[in-house]
């Protein structure tokens, strides 16, 4: 899906289609999209984990079958 959006953005910006990660990042950023580990999220379900904090939250959510968003950081 992102490939389709990137092609459309390249057409809109009159820029060449991106062919590598650096070019994709530059195109996203030229359109106001910030790419970083905090902006990127993952949705998990039934993913118990060890440890305090996030591990407890994930285990609790898994116990109840509740989807949980985590940042990529």
Image: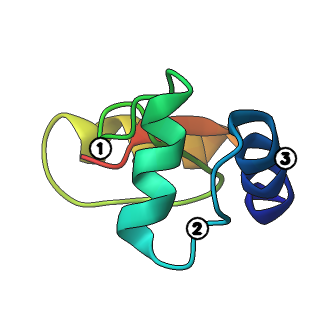
Height in image: 7 above or below 41?
below
Residue for badge 2: 18
Mark 3 vs mark 2: which is more N-terminal?
3
Towards the viewer: 20 or 49: 20
Q: Position of residue 11 (x, y in %)?
A: 81, 46
Towards the viewer: 53 or 73: 73
The answer to whether mark 3 and mark 1 are in CB contact below 8 A is: no
Height in image: 72 above or below 61?
below
Towards the viewer: 11 or 4: 11
Q: Split into 4 quadrants, where in the image is the N terminus?
A: bottom right
The Cα atoms of the two marked residues, 3 and 1, are separated by: 24 Å
Q: Residues within 10 Å of mark 2 (few under 14, many from 20)?
A: some
The Cα atoms of the two marked residues, 3 and 2, are separated by: 11 Å
Q: Residues within 10 Å of mark 1 (few under 14, many from 20)?
A: few
The residue that appears at 42% across and 71% down in the rendered structure is 21
The Cα atoms of the two marked residues, 1 and 2, are separated by: 21 Å
Q: Furthest-top residue in view?
A: 32
The residue that appears at 62% across and 57% down in the rendered structure is 46
Q: Secondary structure at mark 3?
A: helix
Q: Secondary structure at mark 2?
A: loop
Q: Secondary structure at mark 1?
A: loop
Q: Position of residue 23 (x, y in %)?
A: 44, 63
The residue that appears at 68% across and 36% down in the rendered structure is 13
Q: Residues within 10 Å of mark 3 (few under 14, many from 20)?
A: few
Q: Furthest-left residue in view?
A: 52
Height in image: 72 above or below 39?
below
Mark 3 vs mark 1: which is more N-terminal?
3
Q: Position of residue 42 (x, y in %)?
A: 54, 48
Per the rendering, the mark at residue 8 is 3
Residue for badge 1: 37
The residue that appears at 51% across and 59% down in the rendered structure is 24
């Amino acid at each position: 899906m992102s490939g389709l959006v990137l092609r459309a953005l390249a057409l809109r910006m009159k820029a060449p289609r991106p062919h590598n990660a650096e070019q994709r990042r530059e195109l996203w950023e030229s359109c106001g999209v910030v790419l970083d580990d905090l902006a990127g999220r993952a949705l998990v379900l039934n993913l118990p984990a060890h440890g305090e904090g996030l591990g407890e939250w994930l285990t609790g959510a898994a116990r109840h079958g509740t989807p949980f968003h985590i940042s990529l950081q």
